Image (tube, coloured by chain):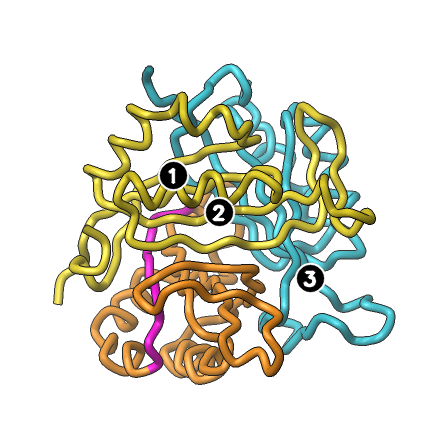
Chain colours: A cyan, B yellow, C orange
């Protein structure tokens, strides 16, 4: 079986706005996504540590593997993503085992 | 010192079957792996949120950096991996500082 | 808007020495970094499980997106990184939406 080229999108952002972004990924055609917790991070906003009461400064990492077509839509509609103020958005090349799962 | 080309394998899957996969990676010759917790994810099975009592729906991310040879074995023996029903399996190119650690 | 080529550095290491490494990344010019918790991992030191009282064996994953210039500095000064005994250091290619954030 061959490997299938796809795009891996990784977004670091505030947990409070993550649902806004995952709903948007759904709308753009992503077949799924995964949200990971973050312990601590430093960025333009300074240091952000998880576990502070209320958790409003908690960050998360959103992983999303998509087809080239969906990745192009993400880039084309990035203004809608940027209103959720992601700290980092990276797109990189990857291969998946089952291409039919990431259309 | 030069950088050494290796493969980075990333698997998103149910926590309950993760040991089955890490044992299999060991058998194929991986020199190590790392398991990260997942907060929430959406895939073919719908939404999966961590922390539900019993945790049987918890997902994890398994990271594993391997040589080209081990990566080829993973692809060749993927049927053994797919019985553990991973949601996502990606393979991507990376470089490591110390090639002797990832044979 | 175009995508901008950057480097994604991923370091798996003991939590107790992570601040030493993030401070070093700051010094080398990284504009930010993100630290993720690890549940369990296997490497040259054997199995390391999170949550053991004291947490002195807890591992973390440090993510850091940087310019080619900063990545080259990381490689050139790697001896300073290796004293913190990272288990894995990978560098890979990625693209970011906003190049001005990762100089």
Chain of the residue under the numbered disc 3 shown in the image: A
Q: Position of residue C95 (x, y in %)?
A: 43, 46
**A42 vs B7: above or below:** below
Q: Residues within 10 Å of mark 2 (few under 14, many from 20)?
A: many
Q: Which residues are magenta?
A: C84-94
Secondary element type, mark 1: helix
As drawn, is B45 to the left or to the right of C90?
right
Residue B25 falls in which quadrant of the image? Answer: top left
The residue drawn where x is 71% and y is 29% is: A26
Q: Are marks 1 and 3 in contact (CB under 8 Å)?
A: no
For the residues labelled 1 and 2, the Cα–Cα distance comes to 12 Å
Q: What mark, if any, has residue B62 been given in the picture?
A: 2
Chain of the residue under the numbered disc 2 shown in the image: B
Which residue matches tag 1?
Answer: B24
Asked if residue C42 is among those painted magenta in the image, a careful observer would answer: no
Q: What mark, if any, has residue A59 been given in the picture?
A: 3
Chain of the residue under the numbered disc 1 shown in the image: B
Badge nearest the viewer, 1 or 2: 1
Is any atom of residue B54 visible in this view?
yes
Q: What mark, if any, has residue B53 been given in the picture?
A: none
Is any atom of residue C2 visible in this view?
no
The residue drawn where x is 40% and y is 64% is: C11
As drawn, is B34 to the left or to the right of B71?
right
| Nearer the observer, C35 or A70 | C35
Mark sitting earlier along the chain (1/2)? 1
């Amino acid at each position: 079986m061959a490997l299938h080229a796809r795009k891996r999108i990784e977004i670091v952002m505030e947990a409070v706005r993550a649902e806004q972004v995952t709903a948007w990924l759904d709308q753009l055609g992503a077949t799924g996504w995964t949200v990971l917790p973050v312990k601590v991070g430093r960025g333009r906003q300074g240091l952000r540590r998880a576990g502070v009461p209320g958790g409003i400064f908690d960050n998360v990492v959103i992983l999303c593997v998509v087809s080239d077509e969906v990745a192009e839509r993400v880039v084309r509609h990035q203004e809608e993503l940027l209103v959720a103020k992601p700290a980092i958005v990276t797109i990189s090349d990857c291969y998946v085992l089952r291409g039919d799962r990431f259309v």
